[in-house]
Image (cartoon, coloured by chain):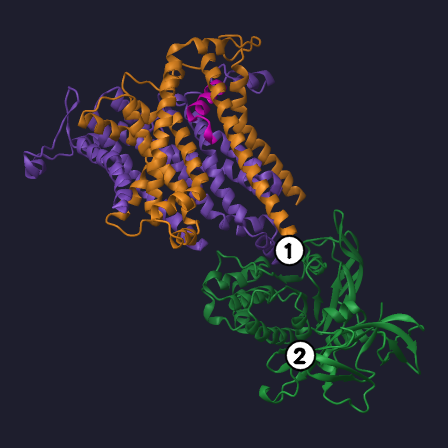
Chain colours: A orange, B purple, C green
Amino acid sequence: MNRLSWFNTVSLTLGFAFLYIPMVILIVYSFNESKLVTVWAGFSTKWYGELLGNDAFLSAAWVTLKVAVLSSTFATVLGTMGAYVLVRGGRFMGRTLFSGMIYAPLVMPEVITGLSLLLLFIGIGIERGVMTIVLAHTTFSMCYVSVVVSSRLVTFDRSLEEAALDLGCSPAEAFRLVTLPIIAPAVISGWLLAFTLSLDDLVIASFTSGPSATTLPIKIFSAVRLGVSPEINALSTIMIGIVTVGVISASLISKQALVRQKRDEQAAARAQ
Amino acid sequence: MRRFLLIAIPYAWLTVLFLVPFAIVFKISLSDYAVSIPPYVPQFDWAEGIMAFVRELDFENFIFLTEDDLYWKAYLSSLKIAISATFLTLCVGYPIAYGMARAPEEWRPTLMMLIILPFWTSFLIRVYAWMGILSNEGYLNQILLWTGIINEPLTILNTNTAVYIGIVYTYLPFMILPIYSALDRLDGSLIEAAEDLGCSRAQAFWLVTIPLSRPGIIAGCFLVFIPTLGEFVIPSLLGGSGTLMIGKVLWEEFFSNRDWPVASAVAVILLLILVIPIVLFQRNQQKQAEADQ
Amino acid sequence: MQSSKFAPWDDPDAKPLIRFRNVTKRFGEFTAIDNLTLDIYEREFFALLGPSGCGKTTMMRMLAGFENPTEGVIELAGQDIAPVPPNKRAVNMMFQSYALFPHLSVWDNIAFGLRRDRMSKQDIEKRVDEMLRLVRLEKFAKRKPHQISGGQRQRVALARSLAKAPKLLLLDEPLGALDKKLRQDTQFELMDIQEKTGTTFVIVTHDQEEAMTVASRVAVMDQGQLMQVSTPDRIYETPNSVYVADFIGDVNIIKGRATPDGEETYRIDWAEGQQPLIAKSSNGFASGQTCHLAIRPEKVTISSERPADAANALQGRVHDIAYLGNLSTYHVELPNGTIIKAQTSNTRRISRRTFTWEDTVWLSWTATAGVLLAD
């Protein structure tokens, strides 16, 4: 076991170093004084200042946020419905097609999704802008939400719903009072997933946005095509920071809930 | 009525925004190029009827794709890059997944979180991070020059090597997670049984651990291979002019050449190429789900 | 069935196959095995019996090579086995979970160990077929483990661990996953196979009935120590401690004070206002020493009249009757509240039962029926 754990230590250390060193470098060099990003010239926060003064970035960030909130909310509603239909819908016409349409966008190359949606929007003559990006993002992220929620619904004890119906709930009440509270964590993580996917998306947004709406990834992409820039480093650091705080606090909250549940169970067991 | 709405709303949404767009792509891939907005002449008009459509139907754009060897090369080189990058990701990811599965129980949630965390950070930023590392004056070359391993800076950025590094880096979590979950479920007494029956550690790993983690390996490989094949961001930021990947070709055909019919034809063929691995992947997942029951 | 001649443990010249010599095993602070010494002989069917956490599984894992003793020596055929890794030991193990490789067929599972020995193809085929015949699974060779029943899986695991003809076969709760009926059939099958192959078997179990059925000798363990090592009949008839008496089967324990009363005979005062009990014992007791009289329910006779010649007779009231089909156990409450269990065979139909609830009855037993144990 000792020799093995030596091997494991090395592979874990190298693996995590590989995953994290690029990001650490990015963060460190965002505080670089010099315009030349690869040469260290002393500590400075001036690039953050410049970033905050850059209206193009700020308005792109605002558009991105708007798109992400709207599309992830729509996607959560539609995706939860889709999951419920998939798991509990029973048999209906075109069920196979439906489940195909839920799973296909997950494996579809983004370039194809983007291209096809653009052609649709042109075909029916919608002007491209924030609305079209929201529609596009809702479509592909609702499928992710569906997968997350349906995996929870599959393990859900059906007799709980039956008990609610037995006690006099209508099907809608049973869903609202019993099913929804229990699958809520999956719905929330579905929303978070949809939100990040939307924040992250470059390709689909590039196809479906018009001149009036530029999202942050589009802005970043056109900037970094020209090479590494300290402003982008600063922006990346802010984004990494937000995500890190979000993920760590989410995992702490869920861990705390788990610890509390375990403690309650132990207390209950002792009380017996 | 409620049930009808419940089914109808998501159904209609996906039909209009997913299925219909595909039909349009397919249709336009059969159209002729025209300098106008939109830059194509629709081949199909309801008024003329289906007969006329069939009469005038030509696979001009597809024939064009076969004639211009740029496309063939792009498809082949995408396949080659995707396959090699998937294999590289497996080689890097398997030891990490194995180490995680053998780590003390109380560490595992933290390790899991550390694997998932990069997945939540922007894809674009993660690719961008490597631009600073791999460029001629980048951090990697600085270190290598400083330690005296090389005398001349290495050209890595804008080559296929950089594309491989980028793919392995960004898709690593997709490889690690399914393999980890397969290894985590592996019953430790199977390894002991193999040793008891005369296997050395290495033999037990080869004869028991690897075959039993195979569903995870297959799932991980598909999860890396399928999106890599149509990848656009990595080849356009890290790759050079010599890096041919079909996602990038499609993008340029569309945005630079504005040849929509050809872009659509490229998309249709890419989709046809993807159908095979997707079907295989589905079958693997299904088989595993059945085995779990 | 156990031939009375097979008793190497009584032969001072017999060489044990396995020797545990002052073996201690600690996991951090926890002592799993505490300075334990034990000999197991060739061709024995040896059972390690005890509640969960008593250290029996640790003993087995040390024999298989998955754990090494913290102190002391384990010898196999006279050689210290500590430096030998599990894959080089002539010891095979049948796992509690069976640990059948799910990706291999029944046939390949059995051949797995043979292939590691670089046996020729024909020899492997011959041996696997022989093993399949032994466990009567010829028809299932091509199946995967999840395509056969639990009882069949158990037999595959047995065949796999026997295929390499080990000097010693370890069985970790081999029948734990089977239902009761199948378990009983399989017990006899195990004994048959053990006799046919002549392999030494060490079985770990928490089921005392199973240990008593299959084993030539049983070691009762508790908290890392051996409480008693003996043949099943001696463990049952002459347990050496209250723990063993209580662990094996059903027993009445009466606590009292012994007073010598003739040769190897003691008078036991056990309750105010009750007649003292008489018991014979070869264990010496001082006058006034605290003792426990352990008496099996089936050795207690129940009758409506006081038997004339009984050494011990007590009157009580039937408090409860447990009807088990072939047997009935009467719980009889004595005037001081003590409950004594008495068991009788139901040779008559239940409607003709002599005693019923609340009847006043007499319980009696001979002076040699019980075992007198020290504190």
| Residue C162 x, y percent position in the rendering | 60, 67
Q: Is residue B284 visible?
A: yes
Secondary structure category for the residue under label 2: strand
Q: Position of residue B249 (x, y in %)?
A: 29, 26
- Disc 1 is placed on an element classified as helix
What chain is tagged by disc 2? C
> In the image, what residue type sits under mark 2?
Thr
Residue C216 sits in quarter:
bottom right
Q: Mark 1 lies on which chain?
A: C
Residue A78: x and y in percent read 32, 37
Tell me: A179 left or right of A23.
left
Q: Nearer the viewer, mark 2 or mark 1?
A: 2
Q: Residue at the far bottom: name it.
A: C308
Closer to the chain start, of discs 2 and 1, is: 1
**Quadrant of the drawing holding the C terminus of chain C:** bottom right
Q: How far from the left and from the top, in percent, is residue C268?
A: 87, 76
Residue A192 to residue C156: above or below: above
| Front in this rendered view, residue C193 or C197 | C193
Do the residues bearing badges 2 and 1 touch, measured as CB atoms within 8 Å?
no
> Against B273, is A225 above or below?
above
**Majority secondary structure of magenta residues:** helix
Specify the segment rendered in magenta: B119-133
Q: Nearer the viewer, residue C119 or B285?
A: B285
* Left or right of B85, for residue C164: right
Q: Does the magenta stretch include residue B122?
A: yes
The numbered mark at residue C329 is 2
| Residue that appears at 76% across and 47% down | C29
C320 sits to left or right of C19 = left
Q: Rate crowding at label 1 as few (under 14), some (14 to 19) or many (20 or more) other CA atoms within 10 Å.
A: many
Judge whether residue C16 can be spotted in this image. Answer: no
Q: Which residue occupies 28% across, 46% down? A: B3
Identify the residue position indicated by label 1 in the image.
C87
